[in-house]
Image (cartoon, rainbow, N blue to C red):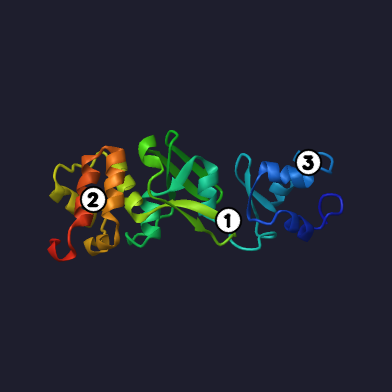
């Protein structure tokens, strides 16, 4: 029993998701004395896990299904959307599994090491922020924002500012050798969207990327 007679399964009925914030928790506990102390007690028991101040997930004893790190990435720091290496792997463009959930944000760059994983946020220009973002349903009946393949690749190119790319050929080598993306996969991307993203970024490198994507498949170099 928990919280003066409220059973654990009753708590789960009242908090239906796996990810929840402080306000939701306080709404559940509003009829009980010393709600903050009760939250602290459950943190010690690991019935709930604090991801960061004001943001929680259920522990193993109360979880109905795995929580979504993608949903949490949007909640930990915002406004933000998942992008860069994590999104490229999500879309099957890069082979390496990415442990850190990487995102782009309008705010300053931040990193968060939490009990459920590492989350990093890279600042991008406001003009480029809203382009190329999809809303995807998670396995917890909530949705999250993630970059399209075009936007994730553009964001990664922008983030790697120290990479020496001075020509379209350098750009081709960067994509195929540095990122290890199969150039044949670019045929599935939308050159028109990449062109709009390049214009918003005002980036010559991303403009070359849109040109690479727009090449007829038969004319691409091996």
Dot 1 alpha-carbon crowd within 10 angstroms: few under 14, some 14 to 19, many 20 or more: some
- Disc 3 versus disc 1: distance between alpha carbons? 26 Å
Q: Which mark is residue 210?
A: 2
Dot 2 alpha-carbon crowd within 10 angstroms: few under 14, some 14 to 19, many 20 or more: many
Residue position marked by numbered label 1 in the rendering: 142
Residue 213 vs residue 68, the one in the foreground: 213
Q: Secondary structure at mark 1?
A: loop
Of mark 2 and mark 3, the one earlier in the sequence is 3
As drawn, the residue found furthest toward the bottom would be 218
Residue 222 visible at all: no
The image shows residue 142 at horizontal and vertical percentages of 58, 56
Is 25 on the left-hand or right-hand side of 192?
Answer: right
Is 206 on the left-hand or right-hand side of 59?
Answer: left
Eye-nearest disc, 3 or 1: 1
Is 69 on the left-hand or right-hand side of 221?
Answer: right
- Disc 2 versus disc 1: distance between alpha carbons? 33 Å
Query: In the image, what residue occupies the spot 13% across and 61% down?
Result: 221
Query: Do the numbered discs 2 and 3 sit on residues whose CB atoms are within 8 Å?
Result: no
Of mark 3 and mark 1, the one earlier in the sequence is 3
Query: Do the numbered discs 2 and 1 sit on residues whose CB atoms are within 8 Å?
Result: no
Q: Which mark is residue 35?
A: 3
Name the image quarter holding the C terminus: bottom left
């Amino acid at each position: 029993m928990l919280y003066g007679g409220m059973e654990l399964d009753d708590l789960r009925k009242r908090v239906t998701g796996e990810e929840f914030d402080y306000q939701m928790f306080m709404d559940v506990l509003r009829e009980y004395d010393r709600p903050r102390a009760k939250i602290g007690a459950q943190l010690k028991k690991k019935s709930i896990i604090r991801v960061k101040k004001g943001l929680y997930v259920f522990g193993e004893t109360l979880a109905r299904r795995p929580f979504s790190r993608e949903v949490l990435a949007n909640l930990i720091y915002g406004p933000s959307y998942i992008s860069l290496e994590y999104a490229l792997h999500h879309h099957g463009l890069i082979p390496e599994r990415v442990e850190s959930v990487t995102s782009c944000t309008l705010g300053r760059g931040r990193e968060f090491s939490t009990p459920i994983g590492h989350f990093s946020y890279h600042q991008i220009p406001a003009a480029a922020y809203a382009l190329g973002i999809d809303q995807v349903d998670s396995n917890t009946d909530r949705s999250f924002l993630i970059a399209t393949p075009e936007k994730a690749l553009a964001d990664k190119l922008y983030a790697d500012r120290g990479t020496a790319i001075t020509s379209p050929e350098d750009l081709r080598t960067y994509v195929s050798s540095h990122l290890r993306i199969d150039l044949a996969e670019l045929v599935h991307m939308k050159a028109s969207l990449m062109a709009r993203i390049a214009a918003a970024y005002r980036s010559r490198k991303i403009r070359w990327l849109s040109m690479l994507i727009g090449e007829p498949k038969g004319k691409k170099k091996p």
